[in-house]
Image: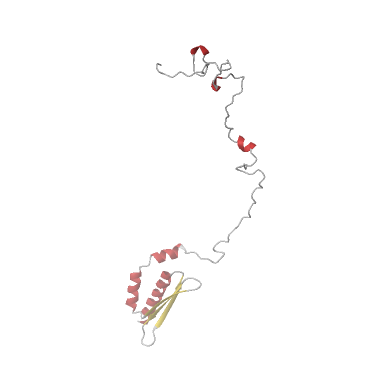
Amino acid sequence: MPGSPVYGVPQPLPSSFGAPGLQGSPTGQQQRPAAMQSPTQPSKIALPPPPGFAAATNPTRPKVRAVSDDSPPPPVRARVILPSPESLGIKFATPSSVASAAAVDWNLVHARLEHLGVVNFQRNRLPQGGFRVVVSLPTTQLPHDVEASGDTEAAAVLLALHRAESWVASQR
């Protein structure tokens, strides 16, 4: 290829070419540049030490290792087993109680309470879990209380409504 560079080892120039720096010295000997000295003569160019060599020869630099050779293996930890929620007394909602809570139409519940003529409606959350609902129905004397308990508020309300409607039907 024309115009391509050609790489090769530089050859020393003979003194007959008259290159500067190759002329005779005052002592009458020829001097060559440092790059053209023969391999038998030691070079006076100082090269930087290879990586890691300076740290090995310099005692003031600390050695840095990724992993210590003398570290003991980590201790084996004891396996921790947690008790089940049931053994701690935690109750989970059953699918039937969740379905009954979701299936309650609160507008319909309020309409049924109005139809019965309820004078008082009370809902209490029980400390052991669940709900208690008290419905007070009108009578000629003191109001009649109908009470019901359930796991969910919806279950307790529906049971109280059923009992109140049964009582009203028995009074007619």
State how many labels appear: 0
Is 169 left or right of 127, judged from the image as shown? Answer: left
Quadrant of the drawing holding the N terminus: top left
Residue name at image x 33 percent, y 70 percent: 107
Whether residue 33 is visible = yes
User: At x 51% / y 11%, what residue is drawn?
Assistant: 16
Camera-side residue: 10 or 17? 17
Q: Residue furthest bottom?
A: 141
Q: What quarter of the picture does the C terminus occupy? A: bottom left
Q: Is residue 103 left or right of residue 65?
A: left
Given residues 22 and 76, the one toward you in this image is: 22
**Which residue is rendered at x = 61% and y = 35% of the image?**
53
Percent position (x, y) of residue 100? 41, 66
Q: Which residue appears at 37% of the width and 76% of the height?
A: 165
Whether residue 13 sits left or right of residue 160 in the image: it is: right
Quarter location, residue 64: top right
Q: Nearer the viewer, residue 109 or 63?
A: 63
Q: Would you place residue 161 above or below residue 4 in this image?
A: below
**Looking at the image, residue 58 lies above or below residue 81:** above
Colour scheme of the rendered structure: secondary structure
- 17 to 90, vertically: above or below: above
Is any part of residue 14 visible from this angle?
A: no
Image quarter for residue 116? bottom left
- Picture coordinates of residue 108, whole percent (x, y): 33, 70
In the rendered image, residue 126, in percent from the top left (x then y), is placed at: 48, 74
Residue 86 percent across, percent down from the top left: 54, 64
